Amino acid sequence: MCLTYSEFLIKYRTFCDLWYQTLVDSMKAGTLGHWGNKIGYVLLPFAIGLRSNPLDYVKETKVVIDKKKASLEPLFAYFVVDLVLKLFGIKAVGKLYHKLFFNTTLWFSNVPGPEQEVTFFGHDATYIAPSCYGQPNALMIHIVSYVDKLTFVISADEETIPDPHRLGDDLEESLQLIKASALAKEGNKNK
């Protein structure tokens, strides 16, 4: 089994919604409010290997992610980056992020999307697929939900991952194995 590290981005604002007024309330009160997303991150140990039951891997990963999200790590990461930005400027933050991201193998972001269909100027959106360009690591995976669909956006360095389409196929096959294992476990519970 191979152990590497991945970057898991967390929307910091969800932790502190109780401390903030909603944007509508702040606009009614005539204050500026808090605009934009506040993003923290955690470093996750990412074990690559085959398991006899795919759900074991999912359970272990969920436990680790839940512990990391409940810790002060994403909050601390956000405040350190904010402090560096205020004290030294955007170039220093760029160097800090580049050094951190360069030493991780994978970025992972799961973004809950809208539960109802969205229209733009009268045109229905069929899917939402955000991504980034120019990151200093080999692989970035965005997972976005939209209505009843999940969209996976994979950004890969072709020198490191020469066949990103195969990676997408392997990811799809892994998700099918996880789904089949979950359905089989649910079927065994109902018997």
Image (spheres, rainbow, N blue to C red):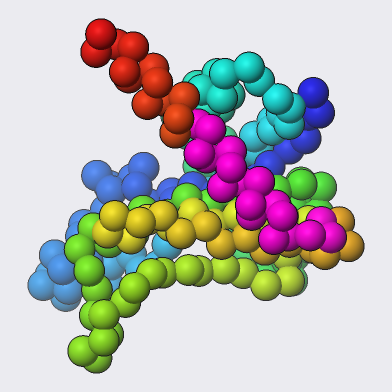
Q: Is residue 137 visible?
A: no
Q: Residue at x 52, y 40 (%)?
A: 175
Query: Which quarter of the picture shows residue 128?
Result: bottom left
Residue 87 at x, y percent in the picture: 66, 62
- Front in this rendered view, residue 188 or 44: 188
Q: Residue furthest left?
A: 28
Magenta highlight on residue 87: no
Q: Nearer the viewer, residue 59 or 32?
A: 59
Point out the image quarter for the N terminus.
Answer: top right
Residue 106 appears left or right of 39 = right
In the image, farthest residue toward the right: 159
Magenta residues (range): 161-178
Name the quadrant containing residue 83: bottom right
Q: Nearer the viewer, residue 73 or 124?
A: 124
Q: Residue at point 84% right, 60% down?
A: 162
Is the magenta region chiefly helix, strand or loop? Answer: helix
Q: Position of residue 110 (x, y in %)?
A: 47, 50
Q: Residue at point 50% right, 39% down?
A: 176
| Image position, residue 34 (x, y; %) | 33, 65
Q: Is residue 176 above or below residue 78?
A: above
Viewer can see residue 35: yes
